[in-house]
Image (cartoon, rainbow, N blue to C red):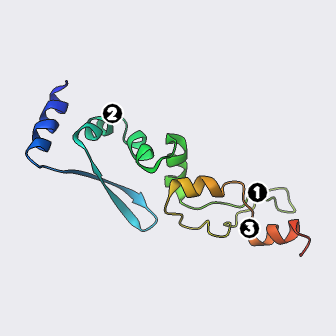
Amino acid sequence: MSDLAQSLKQLAELNVGFDCWHPHPAGCEYITLSWSQVVAYDRDPDAVLAKHYGASKNDFQAWESNFSVRCAGTTKRGRRCQAAVPGGSNVDDPKRWVELQGSLCSIHQAQENGVA
């Protein structure tokens, strides 16, 4: 066991808690970590946070970079639509963010359904 791990374990046995924070649509989110998670966090914070949310590290990083899901549709000029999908603005959970990937904005949904 490393010196860091041993020290953190001793502190945890003395009822010392460990928290970290990360950016979140609401500002920041605080997460309580075990002493062993702190050791892992020291090596790879995003991996620990991704695991906390049940997401892959890549999905967590992509979610944290924007928190919103862009429409998968294309404009008349052939560019990716910049509109957010319904329910896709400031998504507060990376798993939900992943579920919304590939969705269409209201305008592209209407076009696909022959309404617009």
Horizontal side, residue 19 vs residue 44: left or right: left
Q: Is residue 67 above or below residue 26?
A: above
Residue drawn at 88 percent across, 69 percent down: 113
Q: Which residue is mark 1?
A: 80
Q: Earlier in the sequence, mark 2 or mark 3?
A: 2
Q: Which residue is mark 2?
A: 43
Mark 3 or mark 1, whichever is nearer to me: 3
SS label for mark 3: loop
Badge 1: residue crowd in 10 Å (few <14, some 14–19, many ≥20): few
Q: Is residue 94 above or below residue 85?
A: above
Q: Earlier in the sequence, mark 3 or mark 1?
A: 1
Q: Is residue 88 above or below residue 44?
A: below
SS label for mark 2: helix
Badge 2: residue crowd in 10 Å (few <14, some 14–19, many ≥20): few
Q: Quadrant of the C terminus?
A: bottom right
Q: Amino acid at mark 2?
A: Arg
Question: Residue 7: percent from the left, percent from the top?
Answer: 12, 34
Asked whether the beta carbons under mark 3 and mark 1 sit within 8 Å of each other, the answer is: no
**Image quadrant where residue 21 sits:** bottom left
Q: Which residue is mark 3?
A: 105
